Image (cartoon, rainbow, N blue to C red):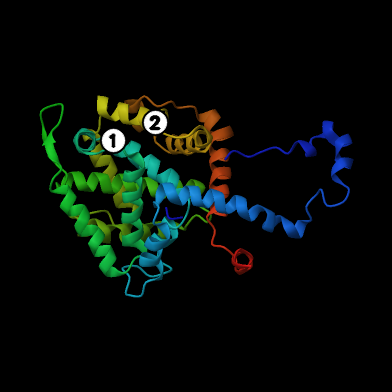
Amino acid sequence: MWVAHPTCDERTHPDNAAGLEAWDHGDVVPKPDRMPELLEPVRRAVAGAVRSRVVGDDAERRASELFTATGERWFAEDSAIRLVHSDVSMFIGGMRALLFQSLHPLAMAGVAQHSDYRADPWGRLQRTADFLAATTFGPAEEAQRAIDMVKKVHTRVHGTARDGRTYRANDPHLLRWVHIAEVDSFISAHRAFGETPLEPHEYDEYVADMAVIAEKLGVEEPPRNTRELKQQIAYYRRELSSSPEARDAARFLLITPPLPLVARAPYGLIGAAAVSLLPLWARRPLRLPWLPVSERAFVRPAGTVLSRTLRWALAPESPEALARTTD
């Protein structure tokens, strides 16, 4: 997560062929070898906007602490968890995870009663992204610091749900539901929209990598392969149900997020792509639509285009681009 509608150029439309001559003289049409240079400001603008929302204003400092600082890491550079978490499909997977997690009434009660997601949705996103980055890519001491901070916050999150049941955020049973909903969502998004989908055994490795973090958070017996992941989700299904808090959260996330007008179209695509990855049984309690034809014909292709656009925007700058900025 540290880590758009496709546009149609009117000049390529057959009806506008007569107007092409005006573009074919002089330097009106950029030469192919200049296109990357001309697009660089656009790429930087998009990247800056995304990073400011997902990482925060101190993105460069935090990236230095996690990515370039020396020290032993929990996971190797070629590990499955790093491959998945460095892909922009995490944006879609993260949205899917929030919707999926809300189906547990006790987990959702904790969010509704203790989270400030309505007043500060970007702050919550930034904290989640920072936790994933610290535990996946950061030095071991930074990863452990992130774990300790979350566990400390969890001690303050407890109360009584609408149905009278009590809950505790550090309850191993609830922690496991939140964990498996995240893992399943990140895998689903990576399979559908990742740049290079992994082999089945690599997704097993990803589940095992995530289990390392889960156990440090207090999850008991987290799944260690995709088969166990499916089994555990099936086990929790009897506990999942609709709730006013979950439906309200879904409306807020998908329909009324606090976003400027220019950001609503790409954000809407992220939401639509996330919903398209949810199974039908998970959509019904949240009153989310099931439109298989539209999803195959539009939502999935649009999600792919959006992922490619974000991947382009967030790609590391080339030496040539960096050189131009210092001229």
Residue 260 at x, y = what percent? 48, 34
Figure quadrant of residue 77:
bottom left
**Mark 1: amino acid:** Ser
**Residue 281 visible, this angle:** no
Sequence-first disc among 2 and 1: 1
Check the image and name the residue furthest to the front.
Answer: 327
Question: Depth check: 323 or 300 in front?
Answer: 323
Dot 2 lies on which element?
helix
Which residue carries the number 1 mark?
102
**Mark 2: amino acid:** Leu
Of labels 2 and 1, the one closer to you: 1
- Position of the C terminus, as image quadrant, is bottom right
At horizontal 39% and vertical 41% (from top left) the residue drawn is 95
Question: Depth check: 117 or 154 in front?
Answer: 117
At horizontal 54% and vertical 48% (from top left) the residue drawn is 46
Residue 48 at x, y = what percent? 50, 51
User: Seen in the image, is 169 located left or right of residue 290?
Assistant: left
Residue 113 at x, y = what percent? 19, 34
At horizontal 41% and vertical 70% (from top left) the residue drawn is 68
Which residue carries the number 2 mark?
280
User: Seen in the image, is 116 located left or right of residue 12?
Assistant: left
**Residue 233 visible, this angle:** yes
How busy is the neighbourhood of tag 2: few (under 14 within 10 Å), some, or many (20 plus)? few
At horizontal 18% and vertical 53% (from top left) the residue drawn is 151
Figure quadrant of residue 114:
top left
Residue 294 at x, y = what percent? 55, 29
**Numbered marks: total:** 2
Tell whether label 1 touches label 2 (CB within 8 Å). no
User: Seen in the image, is 166 located left or right of residue 261?
Assistant: left
User: Seen in the image, is 298 located left or right of residue 189?
Assistant: right
